[in-house]
Image (cartoon, rainbow, N blue to C red):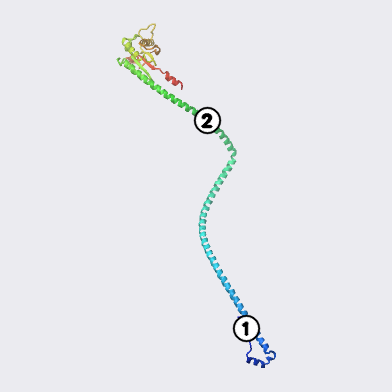
Amino acid sequence: MLFGYLTKLNTFQFEPSLHDQFQNSTFVAYFNPVRMNQFFKLLLMGTVLVSLQGCIVAKKKFDDMLAQKVKAEGDLAEKSSQLEKANAQITDLDSKLTKLKEDTTQLGVRKRATAQQLTDLNKEYDQLNNYYKNLLNNSGKLNRDFAQQKEQLFAIQENLERTRKMNDSLGASLVERERKVKELEEVMASKDKAVQDLKNRVSAALLNFKENDLTVNVKNGKVYVSLAEQLLFGSGSIDVDAKGVSALQQLAKAVKDQKDIQIMVEGHTDNVPIGKKSAYMQDNWDLSVMRATAITKILTKAGVSSNQITAAGKGEYAPLMANTSDQNKRMNRRTEIIITPNLDELFKILGTN
């Protein structure tokens, strides 16, 4: 555009009519055609320069505005992206806020619970602190009590040890005693059986004699053979009748082979004084001894070992019944033959206790 203006300026010429008018005017006095031509060229060039300058300024403004528009569009895109990010952050913050509120609620509950626990712990601490202070205040007494209790504890421990040893000893002794009791029971059972067998043998040997004349019983582990006076003796006599001798011989036959027994022959009378006294027999006591001796001799003669038999007189001093009637007196006049098993083995067991 500028080049076009300059080209027109260089080729500019006044029209002839204008040229003639200017020649006749007073203006020609100062401006000749050459100067006029130069003047108009300068004027036209100024106008062109002014227009050109305006175009340049307008184009620059346009370019600036276009740049601003591009920049504004870029800023808008950036702000839109930032806005989207901000919205996403807001959404995330809202979620976090909700979670934070929930956590805050839970923390509030826990805080209240913790506060209650703290209150309880403070209360417990105060109690323990007071207790500790009391302990410190009473430490002297507690130390004395502790020393005393310690001595008592040592005494209890010593007593416990003694008791334990005693208990162990008693336990061992108890085992030994149980063994001995069992052994004793076995021996007693054996003796009881032996006594019962002996009683049965004696009863069988004396089976032919009247029940009123003799009885056979077991009492306190012994066999008692009670012979009535009418079976053995006449009134006041020490001589055994033939029927009595037969009974004693049968008895001797049943027991003579029993080497583990002892035989006691006891004579008994009533309380009636004897009718005939002699140098050898003054009372019922003498009568009972002499009758027991006579029976003992018959038994030993029949085979019983003299080492196993003993004669004794009880007189009137061991009656079965009160001597208040003839019947009772007749029952009191008797001879008892007591057969006792040998208890040496039993005594040996008992002696080791």
Query: Does residue 112 appear to the left or right of 35 in the view shown?
Result: left
Q: Name, please, the residue furthest toward the right.
A: 30
Secondary structure, mark 2, is: helix
Kindly report which numbered mark, 2 or 1, lies closer to the viewer in this rendering. 1
**74 vs 331, nearest the viewer:** 74
On screen, residue 68 above or below 318: below
Point 56% across, 34% down: residue:
150
Q: Tag 2: residue type?
A: Glu
Whether residue 316 is visible: no
Whether residue 117 is visible: yes
Q: Position of residue 247 (x, y in %)?
A: 32, 13
Query: Does residue 319 appear to the left or right of 26 in the view shown?
Result: left
Point 61% across, 78% down: residue:
56
Q: Name, please, the residue furthest toward the bottom.
A: 24
On screen, residue 63 above or below 321: below
Image quarter of residue 51: bottom right
**248 vs 134, nearest the viewer:** 248
Q: Quadrant of the N terminus?
A: bottom right
Secondary structure, mark 1, is: helix
Q: Position of residue 231 (x, y in %)?
A: 32, 12
Q: Name, please, the residue furthest toward the top.
A: 279
Sequence order check: which comes first, mark 2 or mark 1?
Answer: 1
Residue where numbered disc 2 is placed: 161
Q: Position of residue 195 (x, y in %)?
A: 37, 19
Q: Which mark is residue 188?
A: none
Q: Which mark is residue 7?
A: 1
